[in-house]
Image (spheres, grey):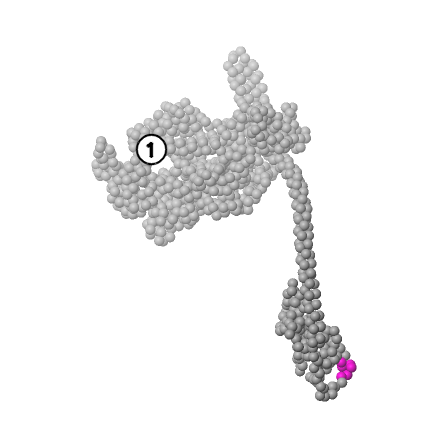
Amino acid sequence: MATVKQKVLFGNKDVSTVNSSEGALRNLAGTPNLHETVNGLKGKAQTRRKSLNDSLEGDIRDFLINESELHTYDDLTKVNPVTPTTVLKCLQARYSAKVFYTHAGCTLVALNPFQPIPHLYSLDVMREYHSASQPQDFKPHIFIVAEEAYRNVQGQVEPTNQSLVVSGESGAGKTWTSRCLMKYYATVAASSQKCQHTVEKIERRVLDSNPLMEAFGNACTLRNNNSSRFGKYIQLQLNSSQLLVGASVQTYLLEKTRVAFQAPNERNFHIFYQMMKGAKEKQRLDWMLPLDQAFAWLPHADKNLEEDCLQETVVAMVNLGIDEEKRAQIFKILAGLLQLGNVDFSPASEESQSCDLEENSKGFLQKTAVLLQVPVEELQTYLVVRTLRAGKQNVLKPCSQTECTIRRDCLAKVIYAQLFEWLVTFINNSMCADRSMWCNFIGLLDVYGFECFLLNNLEQLCINYANEKLQQHFVAHYLKAQQEEYVSEGLQWSFIRYQDNQACLDLIEGSPTSIFSLLNEECRLNRTSDAKQFRVRLEKELSGNANISWDKFSKEPHFTVAHYAGKVSYRIEGMMEKNKDPVPPELIHVLQKSQNALLHGLFDESDSGGSRGHNKVVTVVSKFKNSLESLMKILYSTTPHYTRCIKPNPDCRPLTFQKEEVITQLEACGIVETINISAAGFPIRIPYGSFLQRYGLITNTLLNRDDGPEMSDPSVLRSAVEDVLNVVLKRHAPSSTLSPDDNNNMVHCGRTKVFLTYALLEVMEDHRVRVRSQKAFCIQCAWRRYQCHRRNIRTQAATRIQAGVRSWLLRKEVRKLHKAAAVIQHKWRRWRARMDALAESELDNAEDLVEEEAYVRPKLDTLLKERGSVQLSSIPEPVVVRGWPIGLAVASAPTITVSMTASGFQRVMSMMACLKIPFRQGDYKVKTNQFDQGVASIRAQPRGSIKMHLQRSPLLYANMHPVHKTEGVTGFNQILLEGT
């Protein structure tokens, strides 16, 4: 905060310069002979400071003169000058315009609207940001951070794991932000059609793990209705195709003391209220939870929250694979804890006697034993007595009323903590993928925010310690590391002062003496804890640290720590007992006898938690410190993306912006310093080798591993990098170069890396895309030319082959036709010669049978003969038809009997018989006279009838019994084909 105030006074000027000037003045003032010189220097310094202050105030007034445009600044690095006043005004203007996300250099600032805004997180918005080629061009959104991390996982420059760090005070919106991030990644991963069933299954389980863990790990506090009382780091596991194949959850420091103790105006974990409000009648009977029953560990049960939805939790359990039997066991254990909270003890009449249960508590203890399925007598016994080891014997010692209450609370806390760990393990087993299936991950860190209550104890100390570690990670990764890297790479850089919290961390966790070390040492001593004595020891050992202080007028022992977000006073009373986390072994043995399979499995006899010895005490702060150190190792090995959630007002009122509340959070998390460094620095840092691998194609410079040692020389690599940058800069800004005379504020080449701004990175990417398009076009042209040439060759070859095949087939067909024609001709000639021979033989040997005419032949009219219309029945005398050869040629025609000789009629009848035209119904029947009257001579037409004596008639070759055929070849053609 002091640094921020200095920057308000001195603007962008290096604060170290001003401090050194003041130091010089102090040194000069120490010399008596230089009194006048000192006064002169002081006057000049005051004049200069006043002019700087007036100039800065003028710049601020000029910037704030048009407040109607302040909401258009989507990146606070565009604010000029960068002061807490200008940043606060911009955020307030954007919040009033219902714009809740703002870029602050490498950090995204998220203001909590305290009201639902569904359209801001719809599926269409997710797909829009995911499908965008440049999401940075869109309005600031949490999805931009998510998409940037998603693309960087498989980035071509430096592929690495990603971490999304969501920080802020309690109630600032961290849980909601983490929920949106998980929904985004689940939706993006499910957009692929590959392994759709598996992806949807993992997506469903990842999303359902959130409401289940929030039900068991979140509670309503003074500052937040859905405050996370544990920290979690979720790893979304991706395969090489960037498909979501699994996930895992790591949890940190569940506030299990909330089960047995709730601060004023605060509530227990959500799951207990969900059971009370959402249970059905049958479930109430099974859980022994009547509607009118009041529970001591369930304060403010009449307060209705959105999180009090049992059905959503049950659905999440079902989707995660928790069967009905396991669900029933879980809810009975939780109901047993509520009944246990109503068990109270009355003081013993004598010191040697154990405490008794109050009269109304016996029924609650009986219900507790029934729900937990443990022996009620043993449960009651070991709640009021404890076992002491005396040599080889165990001695039972009665407990005081306070000790009985502590043992009861310890039993409830250890059961709930073990149940929560079992749930986390079950969730991991249901959705965690095998290590061989995934290659990268995206981590989501959602931890409790910085807390400062009226009464702060060990839980708040651990929570604020975790936030100090995250703030140090941010400082070390961005504020400190970047500036040191600029100097090491040879950039001309003036250091920007920032608040470093290393001294506060040394106070809490340092070695050899710190708050944690003294607290652990006090807990390992086998003696009664004394808060006043511990305060005296803290004051003695840590008085030299400026971050700790004491209020000497306070009646209760306490100490105050100056955190990065403000001073917090911690109460010492009860801190040692919470750090010891004692678990009575007698009660653990009782739980191991439970008939509830789940509860019995939680406290298996092989579990080390039930057999703790006095020699080795694992304290709460030791476990939390170790788990937090493992988390920080993961964060330091990944590329972080920061999201700072800001709480606009302490009362959680919708769209209410309080300047004092916001400015405190901005100063605490170092937003102003972040903006200054981002505006003046180079957020993109790429090694020369990686740069050439990605952008070397712009100048046809490719870096291969086999190029030899000369390509590993930084000077050679730098020359190649400068060639690439000059080509890009000349195209983008012809007057800009990399020469020392031109102070380029977009790019700088260091000793081993090239430093870029986001603006130049976009230009580089555009130029790379353009060059790749040109090269791809050339490749396509060459490929199309090659394909066209190959296609023409194949076409010509196919044409030649087809011509050869067609000529071969045609020659084969012609040869076949020639052969067939020769056979036909041979057969025809042979048949013709045979017919001629038979006809001559028959004509020479035939006898004419002349029948006498018994009556006079009627004379037919000439016209009638020509037309052929005559009734056949009126002509008894047969008449030879001149068209006999046609009838012989078409032997399948019906037989014709004609008793007249008429040229017109015979032509008509012969043609109709040949064509097989059906005749109309009548008194006559058309037949050929070839069978009944004999065969007439082919050479000369006889005048009368001919009687033929045939043994081998040529008609034997014809169809003697024709039938009606719709298809096929008949007659002479059939004879010819049969012969072939």
Q: Residue at x 57, y 26 (%)?
A: 708
* Residue matched to label 1: 580
Q: Which quarter of the figure is the C terminus placed in? A: bottom right
Query: x, y (%) of residue 655?
Result: 52, 42
Horizontal side of 534 relative to 719 (left or right) equals left
Q: Residue at x 38, y 28 (%)?
A: 515
Segment tinted magenta in the rendering: 860-865
Work out whether residue 795 or residue 910 is closer to the camera in this orientation and state it: 910
- Which SS does the magenta portion mostly show? helix
Work out whether residue 636 or residue 301 is closer to the camera in this orientation and state it: 636
Q: Amino acid at mark 1?
A: Lys
- Residue 443's place in the image compared with 745, above or below, is below
Q: Residue at x 65, y 65 (%)?
A: 979
Q: Quadrant of residue 89?
A: top right
Residue 803 in sight from this viewpoint = yes
- Residue 130's place in the image compared with 702, above or below, is below
